[in-house]
Image (cartoon, rainbow, N blue to C red):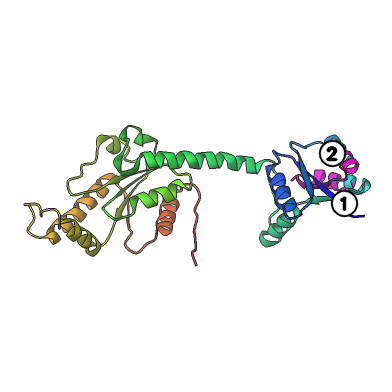
Amino acid sequence: MMADKLHIFAVSDSVGETAEKIAVASVLQFTMERSITRFSRVTKEDQIVKIIEQAAREDALIIYTIVKPELCKFLDDKALEHNVVAINVMAPLFEAIQQKTGLKPECISGLTHKMDEQYFNRMQAIEFTLEHDNGQNLETINEADLIIFGLPRTSKTPLSMHLANLGIKVANYPIFLDTEIPGEIMALQGKVPMVGLTIDMETLLNLRRERLRSFELPDDFESIDDLVAEEIDNAYRIFARLKCLVIDVTVENIEEVGNTITHKFKLPLRVTHYKF
């Protein structure tokens, strides 16, 4: 006889969000009366016995995300005794990963909860990076994980945000012909990783030609070429003084530059994004 309503118990040895989300995603595919009950922090055999007995009474399916193998086996055995269907939703993926890598799972409960902390750290990094864009808020720049300097059009802000999304607090500071590095930054030399971004002279020349349509060439320079050459020389002098890692971004994309930086300074998490 087919059931006219669907009840799922989502059982977990941690907070149970993963099991519950899988249950919700599954039951939404079936148009009938549906209900889900979440059981979290299930770490003892007597708790499992009570859940199995309740599932038998209420004719409920069980899906679970328990990572301890002995507890999984106990749950499976008790479910079989009571004629209750119980599905370990992590087992197929665990098995596939184990076959692929030759490694065994750590069987540590609550790792997804730790990911919530990573998410919080990432949000903090994004907020910090936005507040320290383009030389802002120098009074708290000492809290940065990384400081990026760059000539115009070197993608300082997009690169900073890319790294912030990896949980890295980034400050960026623009370099112009008359730039003098403030004391707050000089004091961090050797304490906070620093990166200098450059582009090829032709790209910078094109940018300057656009700008000089509305601005006069400074008196000190006979040609725009001289101006751009001095800008680049000035940037390299600053980078040398700060002992920056210097990266030419002319032909590199943001992900590649980000990987270079995180690898060089052993900053957290390297992510590569392939777009097809």
Amino acid type shown at disc 2:
Ile
Does the magenta run of residues contain 176?
no
Residue indicated by mark 2: 51
Residue indicated by mark 1: 3
Amino acid type shown at disc 1:
Ala
Does the magenta run of residues contain 70?
yes
Are circles 1 and 2 on residues that touch, CB within 8 Å? Answer: no
Which one is nearer the viewer's eye here, 275 or 171?
A: 275
Numbered disc 2: secondary structure: helix
**Disc nearer the start of the sequence (1/2):** 1
Q: How many labels does the image show?
A: 2
Tell me the residue at 27%/47% (across/down).
174
Range of magenta residues: 54-77
Numbered badge on residue 263: none
Seen in the image, is 115 located left or right of residue 22? Answer: left
Q: Position of residue 72 (x, y in %)?
A: 81, 46
**Quarter the N terminus occupies:** bottom right
Nearer the observer: mark 1 or 2; the answer is 1
Seen in the image, is 32 located left or right of residue 21? Answer: right
Q: Where is residue 263 in the image (x, y as percent from the top left)?
A: 45, 53
Tell me the residue at 49%/59% (across/down).
273
Residue 10 appears in the picture as rendered: no
Q: How crowded is mark 1: few (under 14 residues within 10 Å), some or many (20 or more)?
A: few
Tell me the residue at 71%/56% (across/down).
93
Q: Position of residue 253 (x, y in %)?
A: 39, 60
Seen in the image, is 110 located left or right of residue 179? Answer: right
Which one is nearer the viewer's eye here, 54 or 272?
A: 54
Numbered disc 1: secondary structure: loop
Q: Position of residue 11 (x, y in %)?
A: 77, 42
Tell me the residue at 49%/58% (across/down).
272
State whether residue 275 is above or below residue 193. below
Alpha carbon distance from label 1 to label 2: 20 Å
